[in-house]
Amino acid sequence: MSFPLNELTRLIVPNRAVLGVVVGLKGNRVRVATEQGAVMAQSLDSLTQGERVVIRNGIATRAPVARLRFPV
């Protein structure tokens, strides 16, 4: 059994993380291009166009970047 409010929250903001690239800025909201299409999200960081981000619970943060490279 699930509570209606929890079900509504799950439908509005999915829990999974989505990777994307910032394509537009409007105040503290950013437009992010993802594989599912463009998404609007809030950002706590100061982001610029072209930055890779992760969207979790409707909030965009910078995506982690690999610090080590190994020759293959």
Image: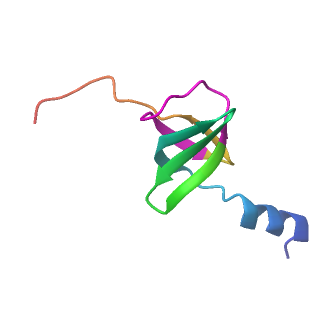
Q: Name the colouring of the figure.
A: rainbow
What residue lies at 50% left-to-right and 38% top-to-bottom? 53
Q: Is residue 50 above or below residue 56?
A: above
- Residue 65 position in % (x across, y down): 39, 30
Q: Quadrant of residue 25?
A: top right
Tell me: 48 left or right of 42: left
Outermost left residue: 72
Q: Nearer the viewer, residue 61 or 2?
A: 61
Kindly identify the residue that appears in the image at 62 percent across and 26 percent down.
45
Give the side of residue 51 with respect to residue 28, left or right: left
In this rendered view, identify the residue nearer to me: 43 or 29: 29
Q: Residue 29: horizontal and vertical position, in percent?
A: 67, 39
**Residue 22 location in percent, x, y?**
49, 40
Q: Quadrant of residue 51?
A: top left
Question: With 54 as the anchor, is 65 left or right in this view?
Answer: left
Magenta stretch: includes residue 14 = no
Q: Quadrant of the C terminus?
A: top left
Q: Which quarter of the image is occupied by the N terminus?
A: bottom right
Q: In which image quadrant can residue 69 be found?
A: top left
Q: Is residue 4 above or below residue 34?
A: below
* Picture residue at 58% right of the left edge, 54% below the top: 39
- Asked whether 36 or 17 is in front, the reply is 36
Percent coordinates x, y for residue 21 in the rendering: 45, 43
Residue ranking furthest to the bottom:
1
Q: How many marks?
A: 0
Residue at image coords 42%, 35%: 50
Q: Which residues are magenta?
A: 42-55
User: Is residue 11 left or right of 67 when viewed as pictured?
Assistant: right
In the picture shown, does residue 8 fall above or below 51?
Answer: below
